[in-house]
Amino acid sequence: MSSLFTRIVQGEIPCHKLAEDDRFLAFLDIRPIRLGHALVIPKEEIDYFFDLDDERIGDIMRFAKPVAKAIEHVVPCKRVGVIVVGLEVPHAHVHLVPIEQIGDINFAHARAVDDEALAATAEKIRAVLTG
């Protein structure tokens, strides 16, 4: 059975895409800790982040960097925190979360967000990435 993220990659489930290349995809989390919270995934379904080969781990972070910078530009924050948890979905992924302080990285704060707010935020982040 394909993971939720594989189904997103395959277009079976819609997402608010921020960036994509032949190996990686970045999209907004639909239950963000804070609006602008994004997920970066390899398109290949690999369950555990640290099962990615060394090259791919470096490449996913290089792919995530401009996405994080674009989030910083759009969402007022001190920085974008990076989290690798890996229990929620059996598909390697990195969370990019706009934060003001360390306590902001708390999944207890995750809430569903209106689809229009996600779409508007995604549009602004994509504009920075392509601008």
Image: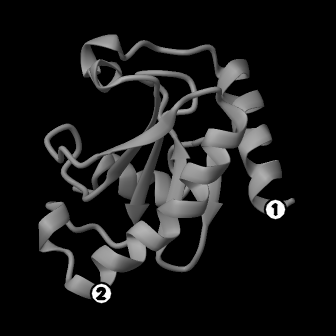
Kindly identify the residue that appears in the image at 49 percent across and 28 percent down.
30
Q: Amino acid at mark 1?
A: Thr
Q: Is residue 73 above or below residue 52?
A: above
- In the rendered image, the residue lying farthest to the bottom is 55
Kindly identify the residue that appears in the image at 58 percent across and 42 percent down.
14
Kindly identify the residue that appears in the image at 83 percent across and 50 percent down.
127
Q: Earlier in the sequence, mark 2 or mark 1?
A: 2
Q: Does dot 2 land on a helix, a strand or a loop?
A: helix
Tell me which corner region of the image, top left, top right, bottom left or bottom right, holds residue 124. top right
Q: Where is residue 99 drawn, in percent x and y? A: 45, 28
Q: Where is residue 69 drawn, in percent x and y? A: 61, 52
Kindly identify the residue that appears in the image at 12 percent across and 72 percent down.
51
Taking 99 as reference, is 88 left or right? left
Image mark for residue 55: 2
Which quarter shows the C terminus?
Answer: bottom right
Q: Where is residue 81 drawn, in percent x and y? A: 39, 40
In the rendered structure, are the residues bearing label 2 and label 1 in contact, judged by CB atoms less than 8 Å apart?
A: no
| Residue that numbered label 1 is attached to | 130
Tell me which corner region of the image, top left, top right, bottom left or bottom right, holds residue 47. bottom left
Q: Is residue 30 above or below residue 109?
A: below
Front residue of 55 and 81: 81
Residue count near mark 2 (Cα–Cα under 10 Å), binned few <14, some 14–19, many ≥20 = few
